[in-house]
Amino acid sequence: MIGMFLGNPAYPTYQVFLTAAIAALLTACFMPFFIRVMKNGGIGQQIRADGPERHLIKQGTPTMGGFVMLACAVIACVIMVPWSPDLICAMVATLLTGALGLLDDIESVAHKRSLGLTPVQKMVGLTLISIVFCLAAVNWVGISPAVRFPGGFIIDLGVISTTIGEGPGAFHIPWLYLIFVCLLMVGLSNAVNLTDGLDGLAGGTVMIAMIGMSMVAFKYGELPLSAFAGAIAGACIGFLWHNCYPASIFMGDTGSLALGAAFASCAIITKTEVTSLVMGGLFVVEALSVMIQVAVFKRTGKRVFLMAPIHHHFEKMGWRENKVVIRFWIISAAFVALGFALYFQLP
């Protein structure tokens, strides 16, 4: 049955749907085994001491579920998707970021603390991955170093470039676009990481965002990339079966950093860098809440929010965890719908 749809140009949407379904099924089925392994090994999440008191009961909950999510998404793509430069580029960036997150999770578990790698170490790692991805996307995938805005406005960030070699094999380094891609990928990876603070919050919002990104990639004509985004969304669905409140497992930085990179890489390849910030508006809000809180507190000694990221602010206001999560899902869906509408206004 799968073979019939695979490679049949009359059914491209089935290929995307089946890839998502396979990723969801594999993740849901393999996660219980992974949870048992984590429990038997005594490997659990370390909860920040200054967080909401009700979260202290989550101490020791198995973590690093993002490893299973990424593995199952890759397997689904191997089964269903014809390989292409854009798919390989996005997948490698996602897996490398996941590997960085895995190191962070291992460091956290090994030292029994809520913090793993230092911020500088993570920033350096994310920046290096972003640089490699950008150069591969420009020189191998062939994307343009230009940023498109709704309404027809385009900024060419390739005006300051270095070209090594001549002819078809020339290697281009668009410096301004390289900086832009680094900011986007590092920013979105950290933003999703900050969103991962409540049971089902990051998994649900990333699922919604990647469904939207899958539609964008399909409309853009990048079927393998559309299926990849669908596989990530499907993996989130399978993960949510075990991560919904009360969570049996957390995705850890292995998952959250990688999911942010997957979203960013799809946006860059489909040339929707600007509208992706709208589609991922909830992640942007989460990151901004932390930046505002830190900046204002350092300047005035006062807090804007009861606690940052902003989902904890609503918890401190008395909202139950499920209430925050579901309402944030709704907000995320609204952002995705708006971003998808703006996509049709791109030049």
Image: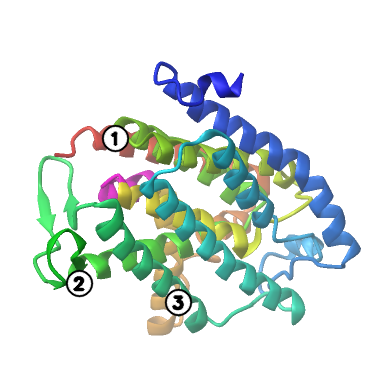
Tell whether 177 sits left or right of 246: left
Q: Are there few (<14), some (14-19), or many (20+) residues within 10 Å of tag 2?
A: some
Mark number, residue 123: 3
Name the residue at 71% across, 47% down.
243
Q: CA distance from mark 1 to mark 3?
A: 31 Å
Read off the residue under disc 1.
Answer: 220
Q: Which region is colored magenta?
A: 270-279
Q: Are there few (<14), some (14-19), or many (20+) residues within 10 Å of tag 3?
A: some
Q: Quadrant of residue 197?
A: bottom right
Disc nearest the viewer among 2 and 3: 2
Name the residue at 62% across, 73% down.
104
* SS type, badge 3: helix
Residue type at mark 3: give it: Met
Name the residue at 56% across, 70% down.
100
Can residue 250 be seen here? The reply is yes
Residue 252: x and y in percent read 65, 62
Q: CA distance from mark 2 to mark 3?
A: 19 Å
Q: CA distance from mark 1 to mark 2?
A: 26 Å
Mark number, residue 175: 2
Can residue 193 be seen here? The reply is no
